[in-house]
Amino acid sequence: MKPGRTGLARILYAAKYSWQGLTAAFRHEAAFRQELFALVVLVPVALWLGKSAVEYALLIGSLLLVLVVELINSAIEAVVDRFGAELHELSGRAKDMGSAAVLVSILLCGLVWALVLFA
């Protein structure tokens, strides 16, 4: 078995693949673009309204969490679609659960913002 890359080369190749994933999500996923737009708009708001490093971390971290979950959901959808367009209960369930995860992360983000700004 051929050994894989190690050290800095491994990190650089991993970063390259990660960048490809981000650009693919931006190019092919409207929801990702919308959530990225929300992040770009709301990060300055978080920096303006937050009062401490913890509040900045909570406000911005909750926005980033939405992007992370959207990336995972998009990956699930891509894998399911790769295996065929025919309807299957498990395929539908996987896509629905991925979508539900995005919804839960958005609700969590809203709750975090409400608690930090109004509590």
Image: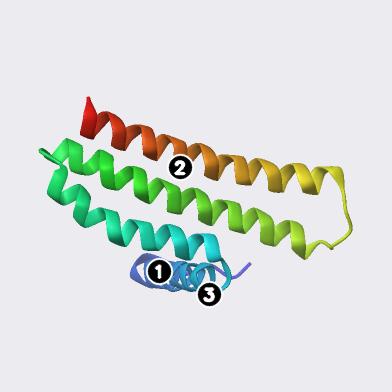
Position in image of residue 65 (x %, y %): 40, 46
Secondary structure at badge 3 equals helix
* Residue furthest front as drawn: 118
Say which of 12 and 51 sits in front: 51
Indicate the amino acid at tag 2.
Ile
Question: Hey, which quadrant is residue 52 in on the image?
Answer: top left
Q: Relative to residue 19, is residue 44 depicted above or below?
A: above
- Please tell me which of labels 3 and 2 falls first in the chain: 3
> Mark number for residue 27?
3
Q: Alpha carbon of mark 3 to alpha carbon of mark 2: how far?
A: 21 Å
Instruction: Give the labeled residue for mark 1.
Output: 15
Secondary structure at badge 1 equals helix
Say which of 101 and 40 sits in front: 40
Report the residue at 13% width, 50% height from top: 48
Indicate the amino acid at tag 1.
Ala
Q: How crowded is mark 3: few (under 14 residues within 10 Å), some or many (20 or more)?
A: few
Report the residue at 63% width, 67% height from top: 1
> Mark number for residue 106?
2
